């Protein structure tokens, strides 16, 4: 049995579910349980229909945050205590694995990692891997970035980049280190995405009242507030309005799927969309990998991990942004993570319009992922055995 303790941000779920799908394919009789201790993350997962369906296809989800009657604090504490008691027994006498991102580092749940460290696996949260430029130069513009001085609990640590600081942590000497390919390259995940994309899109088009299209424009959103690497405090919100205007005017009739992040202010988005009520624009919570499977263009206003999905699916990506001079100096005039960006455009709306118009008129989409994944994965073999 495998017990996966999800983090309080959706990115941990997005990282681990594709890998667990590969484990399930190798060992279909091995139960996989996912635990979430944050009510907002539970709601986000249910809203993300692709991840939610994927979890349901391979295992069971347990929201331990307290919902409905379960929100009563004594009852919630009792549920967690019973879970800990049961899992501690399994840790002592079973062959279960405990997978976590930080949940077993502190508090009562850390007992599981202390009782059975050899079967506790600590994962890097970002399934596309740590990027030094983005994390150590861009993220530190305007502020000092807090870096944890504690190692993750567990005798096995798994990362997606050789630069992940956890690999160099002195407390992790002597542990088993695995560096593996990005989790979204899992063949089982790619087959799930491509095999179910038609179903997800058909539902989305029907709910929007639009005829179905084989090609779409994808626009992924993020935070609309001030960011230190942007030229001005209102850069993100201004970019939202500028981008929507170009997409509405140059999409050549293609439907535009706008994918908010869970940190996006939906009231701000609603106001920005108001002038385009008569345009085929759909606000969608579909997974970016599904959206990218039909994307003639995949657009964002600052780097997002979703661009990794777009690049993997072979979709052309545009980062139309407004980096400050300091950020541009750090990146050498390009994106903070350029390997996933086809077209980096900083502030030049005319160029953005030309590039986007060209892609929209081509209507070229990827029939299959650019990378089919690698089934030879030592972590999958470890958890499947």
Image (spheres, grey):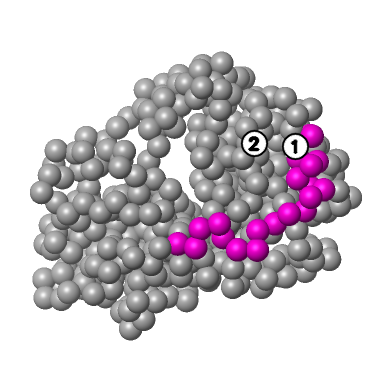
* Mark 2: few/some/many CA within 10 Å (<14, 14-19, 20+): some
SS under mark 1: helix
Q: Is residue 56 left or right of residue 296?
A: left
Residue appearing at x 56%, y 67% in the figure:
193
Q: Is residue 158 left or right of residue 212?
A: left
Q: Quadrant of the N terminus?
A: bottom left
| Region of the chain picked out in magenta, as a range | 353-373
Residue lying furthest right: 278
Q: Is residue 288 visible?
A: no
Is tag 1's residue or tag 2's residue first in the polypeptide sequence?
2
Name the foreground residue: 81 vs 101.
Answer: 101
Magenta span contains residue 363: yes
Q: Residue under circle 1?
A: 355
Residue appearing at x 37%, y 75% in the figure:
24
Q: Quadrant of the C terminus?
A: bottom left
Is residue 68 shown above or below 253? below
Is residue 257 shown above or below 147? below
Please say if the residues under marks 1 and 2 sit with CB atoms less than 8 Å apart. Answer: yes
Q: Residue under circle 2?
A: 343
Residue 115 lies in what quarter of the image? bottom left
Q: Position of residue 95 (x, y in %)?
A: 17, 74
Residue lying furthest bottom: 29
Q: Position of residue 134 (x, y in %)?
A: 44, 32
* Mark 1: few/some/many CA within 10 Å (<14, 14-19, 20+): some
Q: Position of residue 86 (x, y in %)?
A: 21, 73
Name the foreground residue: 206 vs 311.
Answer: 311
- Measured Cα–Cα span from mark 1 to mark 2: 8 Å
Q: Is residue 320 visible?
A: yes
Residue appearing at x 34%, y 44% in the figure:
161
Residue 22 lies in what quarter of the image? bottom left
Magenta span contains residue 251: no
SS under mark 2: strand
């Amino acid at each position: 049995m495998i017990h996966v303790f999800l983090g309080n941000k959706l990115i941990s779920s997005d990282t681990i579910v594709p890998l667990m799908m590969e484990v399930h394919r190798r060992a279909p009789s091995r139960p996989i349980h996912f635990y979430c201790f944050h009510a907002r993350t539970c709601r986000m997962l249910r809203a993300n229909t692709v991840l939610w369906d994927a979890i349901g296809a391979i295992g069971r989800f347990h929201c331990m945050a307290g919902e409905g009657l379960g929100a009563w604090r004594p009852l919630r504490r009792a549920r967690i205590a019973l879970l800990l008691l049961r899992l501690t027994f399994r840790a002592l006498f079973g062959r279960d694995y405990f997978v976590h991102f930080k949940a077993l580092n502190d508090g009562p749940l850390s007992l599981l990692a202390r009782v059975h460290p050899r079967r506790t696996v600590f994962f890097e949260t970002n399934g596309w891997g740590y990027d030094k430029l983005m994390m150590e130069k861009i993220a530190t513009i305007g502020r000092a970035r807090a870096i944890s001085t504690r190692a993750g609990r567990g005798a096995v640590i798994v990362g997606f980049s050789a630069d992940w600081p956890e690999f160099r942590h002195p407390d992790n000497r002597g542990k088993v280190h695995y560096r593996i390919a990005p989790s979204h390259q899992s063949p089982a995940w790619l087959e799930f995405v491509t095999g179910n994309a038609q179903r997800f899109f058909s539902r989305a088009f029907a709910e929007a009242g639009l005829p179905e299209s084989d090609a779409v424009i994808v626009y992924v959103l993020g935070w609309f507030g001030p960011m230190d690497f942007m030229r001005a405090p209102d850069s993100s919100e201004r970019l939202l309005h500028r981008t929507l205007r170009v997409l509405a005017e140059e999409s050549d009739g293609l439907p535009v799927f706008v994918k908010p992040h869970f940190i996006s202010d939906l009231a701000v988005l609603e106001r920005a969309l108001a002038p385009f009520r008569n345009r085929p624009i759909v606000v969608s919570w579909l997974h970016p990998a599904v959206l990218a499977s039909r994307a003639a263009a995949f657009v964002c206003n600052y780097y997002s991990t979703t661009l990794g999905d777009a690049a993997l699916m072979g979709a052309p990506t545009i980062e139309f942004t407004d980096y400050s001079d300091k950020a541009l100096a750090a990146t050498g005039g390009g994106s903070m993570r350029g390997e996933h960006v086809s077209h980096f455009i900083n502030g030049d709306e005319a160029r953005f319009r030309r590039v986007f118009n060209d892609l929209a008129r081509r209507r070229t989409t990827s029939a299959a992922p650019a990378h089919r994944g690698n089934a030879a994965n030592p972590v999958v073999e470890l958890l499947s055995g």
